[in-house]
Image: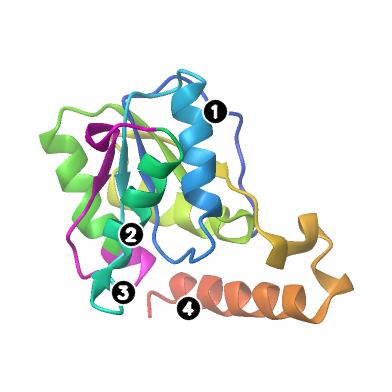
Amino acid sequence: MLVHDEPPVRSDVIVVLGGDYRGDRIVKAVELIRGGYAAKMLISGPAAIFGARESTLAARYAVEKGLSPDQAIPLNRDDTSTSDEARGIVPMLRGMGVRSYLLVTSPSHTGRAYRVFHREGPDLIVHPVASGDPLWCKGYWWTNRECRKTWLVEEMKTFADFLRL
């Protein structure tokens, strides 16, 4: 129920969700761009870290990894949940003429993120792609305390989304 990871397919754009302070999602999106799956990424991430927006820092990181600034586009949004991200990003994708996109997030978050974005934009084709995440223990979440916490938090968020809280 938590993981919905699809093989990447050629898409109009990549959407990278915020909340990854290690950069695993950005690294995955850079790999996808280099692999020819899309030409650019839109990066979510509202939190201010020492006065800088997460999405801005993530875009800089993507440029450090070899992308040009026009390929790593930070979104200046103040979304604090996946539902908020979907409500803001899906109309933006429609306005850009996007028909299909890759949704990059952590493995434990792919299932819920897919459901939320698909519910918000059923007319768009979304392909969730999992990044790396050391706090997921490659799916063996029960083997490590930090991975168990990742599992529990995502289970609670999934349940809250089911109730539309």
Which residue is disc 4 drawn over? 160
User: Which picture quadrant has residue 33?
Assistant: top left
**Separation of residues labelled 1 and 3 (CA atoms):** 26 Å
In this rendering, the label closer to the viewer, 2 or 4: 2
| N-terminal-most mark, 2 or 1 | 1
Q: Return the residue at label 2.
A: 57
**Image quarter of the N terminus:** bottom right
Q: Does dot 1 land on a helix, a strand or a loop?
A: loop
Residue drawn at the location 52% of the way across and 44% of the way down: 27
The three-letter amino acid code for the residue at tag 2 is Leu
Residues at marks 2 and 4, CA–CA distance in whole angstroms: 29 Å
Disc 2 to disc 4: CB gap under 8 Å: no
Q: Is residue 137 above or below residue 4?
A: below
Q: Earlier in the sequence, mark 1 or mark 3?
A: 1
Q: Which residue is mark 3?
A: 80
> Which label's residue is closer to the chain start, 1 or 4?
1
Pick whichever of labels 2 and 3 is earlier in the sequence: 2
Distance (Cα) linking label 1 and label 4:
28 Å
Residue to which mark 1 is pinned: 8
User: Along the horizontal axis of the image, is 72 left or right of 146?
Assistant: left
Is the Cβ of the residue at disc 1 closer than 8 Å to that at disc 3? Answer: no
- Residue placed at 50% from the left, 29% from the top? 32
Disc 2 versus disc 3: nearer the observer: 2
Measured Cα–Cα span from mark 2 to mark 1: 25 Å
CA separation in Å, label 2 and label 3: 17 Å
Looking at numbered disc 1 in the image, what kind of residue is underneath it?
Answer: Pro
Does the segment drawn in magenta span residue 80? yes
> On the image, which quarter does residue 40 sit in?
top left
- Write the start and end of the magenta stretch as one range: 67-84
Q: Earlier in the sequence, mark 4 or mark 3?
A: 3
